[in-house]
């Protein structure tokens, strides 16, 4: 995982696999506190305490065939390298909240990566999941949801390449407006 | 400050896309469009599935091809990631493995546009004897 965008894609993948119908992706960047935090909340099947522990253990895998994977331990490792960390809260049948905190200016903090493209691919790629994307930079915030996009689309698919390109550009321009360094 | 795109702009764009879609034969409902699914499990992401999906979206946009491009979980071919499934309207789905940009380009040019299968097909549940 080279950057935060790839982590987001991966963690949201867990939420989708857990049959969530709504996934919140909350990014907060604060220059004064020198923090970048990523929070992913879903309403999927949730995990038991034991599964949370296992999910955070790089030597455990429930899958039979994989050379990579380890999505959560990798994110944890990257957060800890910056003196940050991750927490996971979850309740069976209710959903899961994962928070990763990074020291923003730390040399090992992974770059945001191609965040506009990534969020647009998540939104277009999962038409049946309401994605709520919120990105704040100091006191400014940009929010975009699948629901409001679909409300503007009538019968046109949110997964159409032309719509995807529009969403990507719209996110890019709005993030630039609030000061996010792209 | 330059003008920033809003959902109002999206509505306007959608209106013009809607009329383009109804002009083009049989393409006004999603089921009648080319369907592409990109496998987006951790193994796929690590092998470049995001770049593949991104490339496919941009290329289809550039070539003005109507399609529905979505993500799917692990298709069980971790050793062949990135994998994608392509389904032309009325045809059976076909799964391709190791789809980096180059192969994605071939799949768009030859399979999606010209209707010819290209290298890299993963045989499996998708190729039953009577759909050859
Ligand atoms: N949002 C979630 N909801 C429910 N279960 C989850 C969630 N995220 C992770 N898990 C569980 O934790 C395991 C480990 O997750 P991860 O580290 O991403 O590896 P992988 O997805 O490759 O199995 C998953 O297989 C799943 O059982
Ligand atoms: Mg995972």
Image (cartoon, helix red, strand yellow):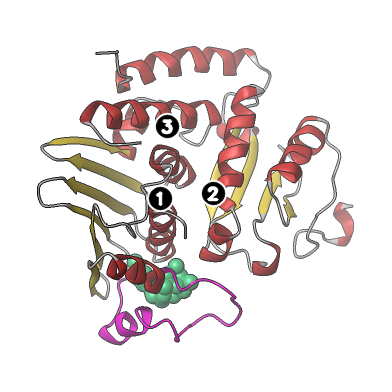
Residue that appears at 59% across and 75% down? A67
Q: Residues within 10 Å of mark 2 (few under 14, many from 20)?
A: many
Q: State the CA–CA distance, disc 3 to disc 1.
A: 13 Å
| Quarter, ligand 2 | bottom left
Q: Nearer the viewer, residue A71 or B40?
A: A71
Q: Can you tell which quarter of the image residue B53 is in? A: top right
The disc numbered 1 marks a residue on which chain? Answer: A
Secondary structure of the residue carrying tag 3 is helix
Residue range of the region highlighted in magenta in the rendering: A45-71
Q: Nearer the viewer, residue A51 or A68?
A: A68
Q: Is residue B125 at all visible to an observer of this figure?
A: yes
For residue A134, above or below residue A38? above
Image mark for residue A5: 1
Disc 2 with disc 1 on a shared chain: no
Does label 3 or label 1 sit earlier along the sequence?
1
Secondary structure of the residue carrying tag 2 is helix
User: Where in the figure is residue A171, as x and y percent of width and height?
Assistant: 34, 32
Residue that appears at 29% across and 39% down? A145
Task: Find disc 3 in the rendering and name its residue.
Answer: A168
Q: Residues within 10 Å of mark 3 (few under 14, many from 20)?
A: some
Q: Is residue B9 left or right of residue A68?
A: left
Q: Quadrant of the N terminus of chain B?
A: top left
User: Where in the figure is residue B17, as x and y percent of width and height?
Assistant: 51, 17
Secondary structure of the residue carrying tag 1 is helix
Q: State the CA–CA distance, disc 2 to disc 1.
A: 10 Å
User: Where in the figure is residue A115, as x and y percent of width and height?
Assistant: 39, 42
User: Where in the figure is residue B12, as x and y percent of width and height?
Assistant: 39, 13
For residue A43, above or below residue A25? below
Q: Is residue A103 left or right of residue B98?
A: left
Q: Is residue A156 at all visible to an observer of this figure?
A: no
Query: Does A175 lie within the magenta span?
Result: no
Task: Find disc 2 in the rendering and name its residue.
Answer: B50
């Amino acid at each position: 995982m080279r950057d935060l965008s790839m982590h987001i894609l991966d963690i949201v993948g867990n939420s989708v696999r857990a049959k969530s119908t709504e996934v919140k992706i909350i990014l907060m960047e604060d220059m004064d506190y020198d923090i970048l935090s990523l929070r992913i909340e879903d309403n999927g099947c949730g995990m038991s305490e034991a599964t949370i522990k296992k999910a955070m253990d790089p030597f455990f895998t429930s899958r039979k065939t994989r050379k990579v994977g380890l999505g959560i331990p990798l994110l944890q490792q990257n957060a800890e390298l910056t003196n940050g960390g991750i927490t996971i809260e979850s309740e069976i049948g209710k959903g899961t909240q994962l928070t990763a905190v990074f020291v923003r200016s730390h040399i090992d903090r992974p770059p945001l990566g191609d965040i506009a493209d990534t969020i647009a691919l998540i939104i277009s790629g999962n038409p049946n999941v309401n994605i709520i994307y919120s990105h704040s930079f100091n006191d400014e915030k940009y929010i975009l949801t699948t629901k409001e996009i679909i409300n503007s689309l009538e019968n046109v698919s949110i997964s159409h390449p032309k719509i995807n390109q529009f969403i990507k550009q719209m996110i890019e321009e709005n993030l630039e407006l609030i000061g996010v360094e792209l | 400050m330059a003008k920033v795109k809003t959902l109002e702009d999206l509505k306007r764009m959608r209106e013009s896309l809607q009329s383009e879609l109804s002009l083009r034969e049989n393409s006004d409902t999603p089921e009648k469009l080319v369907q592409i699914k990109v496998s987006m499990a951790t193994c796929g992401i690590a092998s470049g599935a995001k770049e593949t999906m991104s490339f496919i979206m941009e290329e289809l946009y550039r070539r003005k091809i109507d399609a529905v491009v979505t993500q799917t979980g692990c298709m069980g071919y971790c050793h062949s990631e990135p994998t994608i499934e392509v389904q032309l309207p009325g045809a059976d789905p076909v799964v391709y493995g190791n789809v980096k940009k180059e192969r994605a380009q071939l799949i768009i040019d030859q399979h999606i546009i010209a209707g010819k299968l290209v290298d890299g097909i993963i045989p499996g549940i998708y190729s039953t004897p009577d759909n050859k």
